[in-house]
Image (spheres, coloured by chain):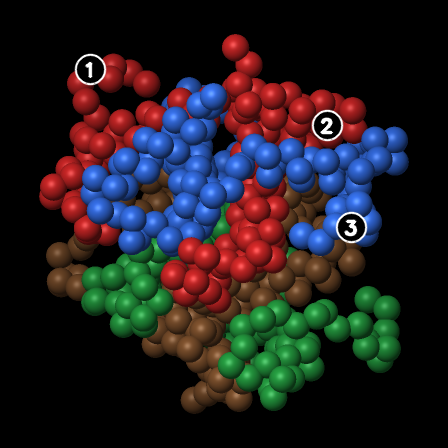
Chain colours: A brown, B green, C blue, D red
């Protein structure tokens, strides 16, 4: 089954190939490009209060959406070049988060939990 | 149809709700969390040459994958809170990129293209 | 006259030289290290409200101070490698900002001003 | 004695005051602004090889210098709002780095050292 992310990755791959940009698209360079786009996203929200950021006016939302598009594009391209499955990687981190942050103990709290010992069943990585 | 990103967004929503973390999950705060995770990702690649970054050793790749998982989780959560479709947003930016970077003119070149005038058919935003 | 930043730059230079780390300290790599440290700084503030961030508790302030130290170290090292005077560069940007943001027109406003045309007396750069 | 950083901090303070921007200048918001500027800096270097980044052409160096100026301005403003001495904070981190990275053991190596136990003489922080 081809997913929506596979389709996007494929389009990005073709976009780079037809322009002969593969040599620029190393993981190092793409991580920098990703950081640059996240910087632009953060800049859109920097002077808003947290509450204001929940309901940006249409023009601000349009600029935020454009930045989210750039961030997604570089993230998917980076994962493609490295052969990483982004959704599987996120679910794996959520598995850890669910064990690390007990729902009762951390209810309504933003404090950080200590890191968990790696479970024995995880094997060597 | 529920996509893989919808499924991830739903799991993240439930993860936040059961811990009563929604009040922390403003777009502003989530953009900061995203920037923090991208910083950790960049740090994994900072001393590698671009070529070395193409084939990280298994332990480095495992750490990079974990960071990509964190980045994806916060990006999907942020988009969910704002009601933005990440894949559609990325395709929209690629539409612009394909017009902006002529394949012949920018073949093998990393220089930036001038921004395009907004096309008349786009209407007001 | 040797300034406090010169002294710091010199100590950082010696720190790198004695460990033979100069080959890692390219501007590209140092900019990535700087981004990584800024990510850690942002992460310290991500769940605080803007008001809370004004008066962090002593332990949080201590962690923020440590991150500010890391950010400063990489910024000064990067500028040293490139031969850039950070304080002069900041003053030059403030010169522009003072012309761009009229005090009356932008009083109490966080909106962005349009970019200024480069003044004719600036000559070629 | 007034240092060059004190002078810059003072100019930034006056710049904000005369425009009544103090309420925007919380540490949280300023850290976001700093992250945005670092993103722009990283973007200037993203497609260069590490070697190319050592000797940027005059126009690229001019843009990098401008971004370094922005980064410095927000960093100094953030430290001023928090009452942190940036140079002292950087020296304190270098004190740690010098103990953590033995010059012989880490010569020519970019691998990370384990974190040091906090020294007993450090007292409570």
> Measured from the top left, where is residue C50 in percent x and y?
60, 32
Horizontal arrangement in the rendering, residue D51 relative to residue D78 (left or right): left
The 10 Å Cα crowd at callout 1, few under 14, some 14 to 19, many 20 or more, is few
Output the chain of dot 3.
C
Which residue is tagged 3? C118
- Secondary structure, mark 1, is helix
Whether D85 is drawn above or below D52: the answer is above
The 10 Å Cα crowd at callout 3, few under 14, some 14 to 19, many 20 or more, is few
Output the chain of dot 1.
D
Looking at this view, is D27 or A113 the one in front?
A: D27
Q: Quadrant of the C terminus of chain D?
A: top left
Q: How far is disc 3 from disc 2 in space, using C-alphas?
A: 21 Å
Looking at this view, is C71 or A37 the one in front?
A: C71
Q: Which mark is residue D121?
A: 1
The 10 Å Cα crowd at callout 2, few under 14, some 14 to 19, many 20 or more, is some
Which residue is tagged 2? D15
The mark nearer the N terminus, 2 or 1, is: 2
The residue shown at (19%, 50%) is: D108
Looking at this view, is A96 or C11 the one in front?
A: C11
């Amino acid at each position: 089954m081809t997913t929506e992310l596979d389709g996007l990755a494929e389009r990005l791959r073709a976009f780079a190939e037809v322009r002969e940009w593969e040599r620029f698209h190393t993981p190092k360079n793409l991580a920098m490009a990703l950081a640059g786009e996240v910087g632009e996203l953060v800049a859109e929200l920097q002077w808003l209060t947290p509450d204001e950021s929940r309901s940006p006016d249409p023009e601000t939302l349009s600029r935020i959406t454009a930045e989210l598009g750039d961030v997604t594009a570089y993230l998917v391209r980076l994962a493609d070049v490295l052969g990483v499955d982004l959704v599987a990687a996120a679910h794996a981190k959520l598995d850890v988060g669910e064990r690390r942050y007990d729902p009762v103990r951390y209810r309504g709290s933003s404090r950080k939990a200590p890191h968990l010992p790696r479970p024995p069943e995880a094997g060597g990585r």
